[in-house]
Amino acid sequence: MGEFKVHRVRFFDYMPSAIRAMAFNSRTERLALSRADGALEVFNFADSYFQEKVIPGQDGRAVEALCWVRGRLFSAGLNGEITEYDLENLRPKYTMEAYGGPVWTICSNSQGTHLAIGCEDGTVKIFEVLEETIRFQRNLDRQKGRIISLSWHPSGALIAAGMMDMIKVFNAESGHATHRLLVERGVGASKSREVVVWSVAFLSDHTIISGDSAGKVQVWDGVTGTLVRTHLVTKWDVLALSVSRDESSLLAGTSEGTVVQFQFISSTVDQHDKEWVRTRTFKNHTHDVRALAHTDTAVVSGGMDTQLVVRPLLEKVEKNTQESALRKIAFPHRSLVSCGKKAGMLLFQFHGHLELWRLGESDGHGKPGDSLPVKRKPEKLIQLKRKGDDHICCSALSPCGGWLAYSTISSVRLYRLQYNGSNISITKVAKLPKVLRSAHQLCFSSDSSKLFASTTHSSVIIIALSQSECKYLHTLRPKSGTRQPVHLMSASEDGKWLATANSDCEIHVYSLHKLKLHCTVPVYSSCPTAMAIHPTTSNLVMVHADQQIFEYSLVQKEYTEWSRKLQKQGLHHLWLARDTPITHLTFNPRNPAHIIMHDTYMFCIIDQNLPLPDQKTLFYNQMTLRSLPEPERTSHSHSFKICKTFQHLLCVSLLEDHSLVVVERPLLDIASQLPAPVRQKKFAT
Amino acid sequence: MQHNNNISGVPLFFHRRRCCSVFLFPALNQSRRRLMTSPAPKPAAAESFGSPLDSSDDEAPEEVTFQASKASALQSLKRALDTARREKELLKEKRRRRQELFQEQKVEFPVSWLVVSLKGNYTVQTVKERALASSQQQVALDFLQSRLYGPGSCRTTSNELLSLQNKRGRKKSAAVQFVNKGWGEFSNM
C-alpha cells in the first residue's frame, strides 16, 4: 500500500442543515428534499440514491413544503412566497408572492392542474398551473387561524385542511367548507394548549387521516365527518404523514424520531372489512422526523438530525440484497473541500463563507502508526464571507494557492491571494468577463493559468488568468445538445485535457490545445460521482454511483485493457455493497499504477499492477497481510487496498510532497451540536 | 373572566336606574342579559329598584295619553339601546386592547425566554436571526419554535442523549463530554 505521512484534519466544522420537507416523484423516481437553510437537493432513487442536483439556499428563504407537478418542482415557505425551480440551471425560476402571510403547505391535485397553498392568515389559495408559470385563481372561504396542512382528494373535488384544533373539508369548486372535524386536545397540562394538525391525508375512499401535536393519528370518515379510530402513537407530536401510492400503507413521523407504519388490512383472519392497523415502528433517527416519503418499496425519512434515511420495506424487496439494505445519507455527494496541492492549503466551503487553512508541519520520523509531533500548527489564513443573500454553490482553490474563486447563483467572484509565509493578502479581481455570470462548477488548470467555469447546457467558459488581467478565451460546448448542468469537472495535470460530467450521465472530454470537443465517453447508465485524468498516461478514470469503475484512454478513444479486465471479472461484492459513493479521485505521481479514491467510510488505493480480487478472495485483507511474513504477502495481495482508520471522510488528497491529507468530520461531532431531542425515560437510568 | 364582568357590571347598573321607567323593565332585563355573560343577575338589586314605585299605590294613577306614554316609552327604549351599544363598544375596545397586549408579549417573549430555558451549548436552527424582513415570518417561526421546543415540549440535550447511549450501549463508555475524542489509535492501519 505504501507509506504516507498523513495530515489528519479535523478543523472543518461542516454542519449539515436539518431536513425540513420532502416530495417523491414516483414517475421519475426523484426525491426532492429541502433543508432548513433553504437549500434543495434532488436524489435519483433509480441510480443508487445519488444526490444528482443541489440548489443552494438563500438567506430568508425557509422552504416549508415541496410539491412535484409532473416534472416540475414547487416550494412554499414562511417568507410567503411560492417558488418554481429551474432544475436545469439549478436556481429558482420565479417566485410569486401569495399575499396570505407565511405559507405552511403546498399540494397539487392528482391531475396536476392546480396547486393549493395554506396560509397563516387562514386562507387556502388555489393557483392554476400554466405552461410556464402559475396563476392565482381564487381563495376558498377564509378561516380563523392558520392552515397548517392540506390534502387534495384524488378526485380533485374536495380539500382537507389541517388547522388549530380542527380539520376542515372544503368543496374545491364552491370554496365553501362542508365539514368541520374537531380534533381533541391532549390530556393533562396540554389540555389548555391548542392542538396543531401537522399533517392530513385525504384518501380516495373519503377517509381522512390526521397527525397532530397531541401525538395522535386519527382516522376520520370524510363523508359523514365522524371520527372512526384514534391511534395514540407518541407522547410528543406526530409531525409528518405519508401514504403509499396504492393507499394500503401509511407512515407517521414523530418527534421521538420514530416512524410508525399503519396498514389497511383486516385485523383478524376471518374478517373481511379492512381497517387501519398499526403494524411496524422504525427508529432510525435521534431527533424529530419532520419529513417523510413513502415510495413503492421503502420508507424515506429525514428531520432535525440532518440525515436522510432510506429503509426498504422487506416484503417489497428481495431479502439480503443490495436493495434491502438500510441507507443513511449524512454527507453531500460532492466535494466541499478543495486542496492547493503545491501550497499545502485547504479551502473549505460552507454555505455562508469560505475558510482557507494552511496545513501544519512536522519534521519527525516514526514507524507506521505513530503520531508525529507537530512543529507548526495548522492555521486559518482567511475567512471569507460571501456577498449578497445567495448561498455559495461551488468554490475552488488553485493548486498553487494563488487564486480563489467561488460562485453563487447570481455572481462569480475571483480573488488573488499572496502569501509569503507570514502575511497573506487577498485582492478581489475587479473586472471579470461579462459572460461569467454564474457557475455550477469551478476548476483551475494545474499551472493556475486558466479558470474553467461550467454554465448553462453543460458548456464551459475558459478564462485566462494573469497578474495584470483576466481575459475570456473560449466557450466549450458539448455536441449532444444536453440541457443538464455539469456536476463534475476535472483538468489534466499536463494541461491538455478537460473532462466534464453532467446529470445526463454524459462525460465530455475537450482538448485544451485545440479548444474543441475531443471525444465523448460511451454513456453508462449510472451517473459518474468522481473522475480524474491520469497525469502521465492520459487515461480518464471514472467511478459511478453504482460503484463501477471504468478507465478510458483519451488517446485511443477506447476503454483500456485494465478496464475491460475489471468489467469482465466483475468487482468484488463487498466493493459493490458499500453504500456511499466515491466522491474524490486522485493519482500518485510516484507510482503511476496507483489510483487513490475515497467515500465516507474508507479510502482505497487501487494498484493496477496487482491481480484483481475474485469473489472468493478476502477483500479487506490489510490485517491479514500484515500478519504474514514478507515473502508470502505478494501471493495474497490484490489490487484493492482499503484503509478504514479515518472515518467520515470529506476529502482525501495527495499533496505534492507526497503526504496525504484526510479531512474527517466525525458524525458524533455533528450529533453533539444538534438541537434538543425529546427526553425519554429509559429504564434504569 | 367572571370576576371581571362583575366589577364592570356595578357602575352600569346605577346608570340604568336613573333613566328607566316602568315600560322599560323587560327591555332592560333583556339587554342586560345579553350584555353580561355571568348568568345570575342580582335579585336584591332588582327588588330595591322596584320599591319607590310601589309607595304611591293608594293614589289613583295619573292620566297619561296613549301617545305621550308611547313616545316616552320609545324614547327611553332608544336611550337604553344606545347605552347598551355604548357598553358593548367599551367592552369590545377593552378586549381588543388586551388582545393587542397579548400579541405584543407573544412577539417579544419566546426568543429571549427560550435561550434561558434550553440547557447546553447549542444553537436551535429553526429560528433565524432577527434580521428577517417580515415580522409575520418571525411570528410564524416563533410559533413553530414554541410548539416544538417551548414549555411542555419535554426536551433534553443532545449531550445527554449521547451519554445515555454510551451508558446503555453494547460498548459502555463515559458520558460524551468525558469521552476522549482524540485522534484514536493508528495500530490497525
Image (tube, grey):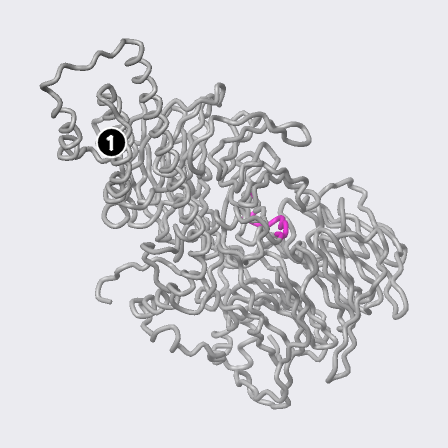
Residue A627 appears in the picture as rendered = no
A570 sits left or right of B114 in the view: right
Q: Quadrant of residue B90?
A: top left
Nearest the viewer among A402 and A459 is A402
Nearest the viewer among A294 and B53 is B53
SS class of the residue under badge 1? helix
Residue A196 appears in the picture as rendered = yes
Q: How many numbered badges does the structure rendering display?
A: 1
Q: Residue furthest top?
A: B66
Q: Residue at x 55, y 39 (%)?
A: A29
Q: Amino acid at mark 1?
A: Arg
Indicate whether A643 appears above or below B59.
Answer: below
Position of residue B176 measured from the top left corner of the image (x, y, whole percent): 38, 73
Position of residue A245 measured from the top left corner of the image (x, y, whole percent): 45, 32
Indicate whether A601 appears above or below A548.
Answer: below
Nearest the viewer among A621 and A266 is A266
Q: Residues within 10 Å of mark 1 (few under 14, many from 20)?
A: few
- For disc 1, the chain is B
- Label 1, on which residue? B17
Nearest the viewer among A216 and B162 is A216
Position of residue A138 measured from the top left corner of the image (x, y, whole percent): 55, 25
Q: Quadrant of residue A591?
A: bottom right
Asked if residue B184 lies in the magenta stretch, the reply is no
Asked if residue A56 lies in the magenta stretch, the reply is yes
Position of residue A230 measured from the top left corner of the image (x, y, whole percent): 27, 36
Q: Residue furthest left?
A: B58
A222 sits left or right of A632 in the view: left
Indicate whether B38 appears above or below A501.
Answer: above
Q: Which residues are magenta?
A: A46-58
